[in-house]
Amino acid sequence: MISCLIVDDEPFAREELADILEAAGDIQVIGQCSNAVEALQAIHKQKPDLVFLDIQMPRITGMEMIAMLDPDNMPRVVFVTAYDEYAIKAFENHAFDYLLKPVDEQRLAKTLDKLRKDLRPKDMTVIAPDSLEILPCYSGNRLKVVPVKDVEFVFSDLGGIHVATATSQVHTQMTLKLLEEKTPLVRCHRQYLIMPSAIREIVLLDTGAEVITPSGAKVPVSRRYLKSLKQMLGFQ
């Protein structure tokens, strides 16, 4: 069975597509999501083979969501949109496939035939934005969208990846590596990334250093990254 996830902010569109897919016989719809934050969590936990992804969604668009996925472990993505010229011009040469709303069953059948013949993951980084302006996060049962400019630092521990702002601390399922590549955050420790604009002072220690942020938080800096961090800030 080919597992798939449907991501669309329109409930009717999700249900209609799910009904068509279930009739295919070898496609299992393992979940439906109404926004990108829910979808990122579902992809991380359930690891579907295929994602049907709407392009136009509130807060985080389908294209922005693609940039938040680990390119080495991402599923195949079929874009679903009501805007044919946007999908064709932007994604025809790079996405696994695209479908127009309302979804035509014969067109979908061609997509599924193509999928069955090619189960290799597709590299979507060619169409993903080079940088992120918002991060999908969560705190308990609350889904949160955090502007990158508000982040002071990010760190990992046994509890996962934590995103710290001046006023709160939440979790994200994005990796430190991806955040380092897609945001202005820079590595200051094996387990920490720091926002350069959040550095108010650096306290030098025998074992390295620590950064003091505007909120008063202390972020460790290991010896390995201290020199490059000082040079980035203009210190010799």
Image (cartoon, rainbow, N blue to C red):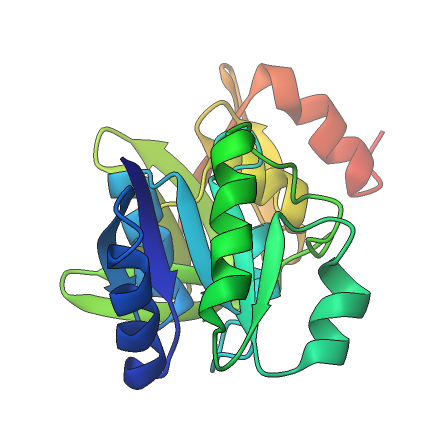
Image quadrant holding the C terminus, namely top right
Residue at figure coordinates x 23%, y 57% from the top left:
31
- Look at the picture and state if 222 lies above or below 8: above
For residue 220, say whether it is visible. Answer: yes
Q: Quadrant of the N terminus?
A: top left
Inspect this view and state whether residue 218 appears.
no
Q: Which residue appears at 49% of the width and 15% of the height?
A: 207
**Foreground residue among 51 and 106:** 106
Closer to the camera in the image, 121 or 43: 121
Residue 134: percent from left, percent from top: 53, 66
Residue appearing at x 65%, y 48% in the figure: 182
Residue 138 vertical position relative to residue 124 in the rendered view, above or below: below
Left or right relative to 111: residue 52 = left
Q: Is residue 59 left or right of residue 1?
A: right
The answer to whether residue 16 is above or below residue 181 is below
| Location of residue 14 by image quarter | bottom left
Instruction: Give the side of residue 142 with respect to residue 61, left or right.
Output: left
Q: Position of residue 49 (x, y in %)?
A: 39, 38
Could you say which is closer to the camera, residue 147 or residue 103? 103
